[in-house]
Image (cartoon, grey):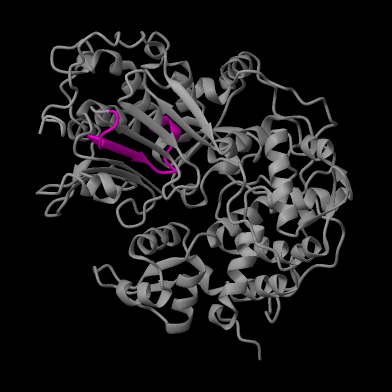
Amino acid sequence: MPDHRISAHDAALVSKAIDRLAPRWTTWTLQTIAQHGQMRLTKIAAALPWLSTQNTQQILRQMHANGLLDRPDRGVYEVSPSGRNAHSVHRTLAFWHRTHFSGSGPAVAEAERTENALRRLRGEGAVDVLHALSEHGPLPHGELRQASGLATGSFYYRIRQLQADQLLARAGSSFGAAYTLTPAAQALGPIYGELAAFESMAPSVAVQRKPAALATTSTARANAAVRRTPAALPGLFSHASAPPATCPGTRHGALPPLTDQVIRMPTVRPRRHTGARAHSRASRAGARAPPPPELFLMPTTGPRAFRPDSDVLIAPVYLAGPGPGEPVFNTLDSAASWTKVVAFGEDTYYTSPCQRVRIANVMDSHYGGWTFSYAEDPLGVPDWITTFDRDTPREIVAAFTDTLVAGLPNNFADYLSGGKHHTGHTPATVLSSHQWEAVRGTRPFRMVSPDGHSAYRMRGGWLHEYDELLDPEKSTWRMSAGPDPISAPSWQAYFSRGTPEHLITATADALIDPRPVVRAAFLIPDRHRSLVEIQPLRPDQATSRSTAALARSSRTNTVHQVQPAPAATAPVTPVIAGSRRQR
């Protein structure tokens, strides 16, 4: 009788297979080429209109290097034998995701289900942690870290991520409670078997673990564009007819074919080549193309069902998902005299005219979101650092960014006592005014939203000044949200002790903003669909996503009026009292 445990399969083979198949858009690209046969880059780019030609080319190169595609001729791609073997893996992954994570939310394309399933399994140490729990049973965190062989920092990050992805749970509420596999994770045995079998037949190549230049920000923009771009091939992303696959050694029987839910788009139109990003955004904001009809032919029954290609209004904002990055990029791109550098095709860096503020959007970093640092001495150690992880709603990041950019030229004088934007509020007073309640008898100090799905934490006591600069998790302030915002949040934002209070207050204002935000229905996080209020977007509300996001910020108008920084000869007043340089 076959062994369906995770630990029954070679963890090294499973990890290599996941690294080969999991990079974003690999599933969509592979299925597109499998359906249409040999394709040139231009035709593939037209079939994936939400990706730029450059990103499409980089995805193809990576897939070719990983042995999923062959190149029979210059500029021509076809699915390799290894790529054809991935077909049964995709079907098994989609079935697993549909079984355990469908919920009551909008229907999701099968290719997207496959990519979501791979995303949950991907990540350094994820296979090791799941393998250890399958082999040894429930383990406390110390024994689990030792069994998985991960370093302390990587272990705690991976544990939180697996909890957020509903693959890991705790056997109790006490601090020393053991970790255990969820039912979804326990059902991974057949999938691990498929992945190990796939990798054992794959060519021996050095698998590229990091996508060449596919940034999270560009991915977010691509996710938004997938619903609204009418340029694509007919019958896109449907699988070729094939006998239903069966999970090896299981009693599930035949899996439903992927052709049950086919994505169709209208005929191809020429791709539009844009110039400067700000100009292209402005033009799109003025006249947005309507979403293509019948983009997703999927069931949309039930009170909470919406067409996956439709825009919907989501509230509260802290459960709406990351959303597109335009609100942040618009502010920084339009700020006077700020410099911008794009490194490795995917990582974006901004520097203020005074060189004191540096902002990084590094895709493959530990947190993968936005990091802001301020140093009175531009070449010295930062005085404060703020970190928003990759899943933080962009409206919340934009509120921090808008206030930072608007106030920096005059050293935040307008936001300090006596300034025209000074309110006298603190983050705690802003939250308490919206019925957030302090959790009594806890250290550190915490406040929780009325629905229990967002939290604010403030540490007390002594902490070495460098500790929280080196480790965001030790920061004085933290904001988070999710079904369990304290133990297993969906996203987190960290503010070190020196972060100006008015910037944290601006972030808190965005956190409690009751106005709904615009999202694509199929991009709502699976864990949040039963927790959010979803309303259809009326035709008179159908503005572009970037315009809707910018309109939410009361500071948007001031951002475009930022004056150049003072001349180099002008004295610069330190922003942070008692800064490190003074000490």
Q: Is residue 274 above or below residue 93?
A: above
Residue 543 visible to an observer of this rendering: no
Q: Residue 398: give x, y in percent of width and height.
A: 40, 27
Q: In the figure, is residue 103 to the left or right of 160?
A: right
Q: Is residue 91 above or below residue 223?
A: below
Magenta-colored span:
378-396
Q: Residue at x 14, y 49 (%)?
A: 463
Q: Is residue 111 above or below residue 214?
A: below
Q: Residue 460: give x, y in percent of width and height.
A: 12, 47
Q: Residue 65: give x, y in percent of width and height.
A: 72, 55
Q: Residue 387: give x, y in percent of width and height.
A: 34, 40
Q: Quadrant of residue 15?
A: bottom right
The total number of labels drawn is 0
The quadrant in which the C terminus is found is: top left
- The residue nearer to you, when weighing 468 against 571, is 571
Q: Is residue 226 magenta?
A: no
Q: In the figure, is residue 347 to the left or right of 116?
A: left
The quadrant in which the N terminus is found is: bottom right
Residue 389 visible to an observer of this rendering: yes
Q: Residue at x 58, y 83 (%)?
A: 8
